[in-house]
Amino acid sequence: MNNLLNAMLHAVVYAFTAGALLVAAYYVLDLITPGHLGRQLRGDPDGDEETMPSQSAGVVAGAWTLSNALVLFTAIWTNGQTDLGTALLWTVAFGALGIVLNIVMFLVVEALTPGRLREIVCTPGPVRPLAVLAAAASLSVAGIVCASIA
C-alpha cells in the first residue's frame, strides 16, 4: 500500500511539474508570435475576416505542445525509477531544453523561408504550408531530444 501511495504522490508531482512547463511553453510561443495567441486560436467566428481563428496557429501551437509533452514524457519515463529529486531535475532540465530548442527551430525555419513565419502563423484562415513546416520542425525537435534522453 505504501508503494501505491508513493507512486501516486510522484504522479501528482510529475503532473504539476509537466503542466507548469507546458504552460510556460505556450506562453513562450505566445511571446514569439505577434498578437495574442489565445485570440488567434479562438477568433470570433461571427466576426469579420480579421477576427477569424487562425488554423495555422492551431497547427503550430498543437505541434509545439505535443513536442514539449513528448520530451517531458520521455524524461519522466526514463528516470521514473530513480529518486524523485533526480527524476524531477531531469524533467525540468530537458523540458526547458525542449522549449529553447523549439524556439531556435522556429526562428531557423523563419530565417530559411520567405516571408515572416510569425505573421503567417497568425493569419486568419486555412492552414498555410509554412505552418505545417514549422509544426514538423517542432515535432522533429521532440524526436531528437527524446532520443538523447533515452
Image: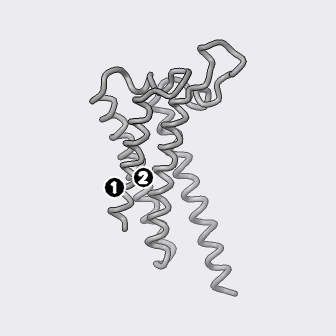
What is the x, y in percent for residue 126?
54, 25
Question: Could you tell me which secondary element the residue under label 1 belongs to?
Answer: helix
Structure colour scheme = one colour
What is the x, y in percent for residue 109?
32, 34
Instruction: For label 1, count other residues whose C-alpha is less than 10 Å away and answer few (under 14), some (14-19) or many (20+).
Output: few
The quarter in which the N terminus is drawn is: bottom right
Q: Are marks 2 and 1 in contact (CB under 8 Å)?
A: no
Residue 65, label in figure: none
| Front tag of 2 and 1 | 1
Q: Is residue 20 above or below residue 124?
A: below
Amino acid found under the numbered disc labelled 1: Ile
Give the residue at x 35% y 46%: 101
Judging depth in this view, the residue of 87 and 119 nearest the camera is: 119
Question: Could you tell me which secondary element the residue under label 2 belongs to?
Answer: helix
Which residue bears the numbered disc 2? Answer: 96
Q: Quadrant for residue 146, please give it.
A: bottom left
How many tags in the picture?
2
Amino acid found under the numbered disc labelled 2: Ala
Q: Residue furthest top?
A: 48
Give the residue at x 40% y 58%: 94
Q: Residue furthest right?
A: 46
What is the x, y in percent for residue 108?
30, 35
Could you tell which of marks 2 and 1 lies nearer the N-terminus? 2
The quarter in which the C terminus is drawn is: bottom left
Give the residue at x 48% y 79%: 81
What is the x, y in percent for residue 95?
44, 55
Give the residue at x 52% y 38%: 61
Instruction: For label 2, count other residues whose C-alpha is less than 10 Å away and answer few (under 14), some (14-19) or many (20+).
Output: some
Q: Is residue 3 left or right of residue 133?
A: right
Measured in 3D between alpha carbons, the distance from the residue under mark 2 to the one under mark 1, in whole angstroms, is 14 Å
Q: Is residue 123 above or below residue 76?
A: above
Which residue bears the numbered disc 1? Answer: 144
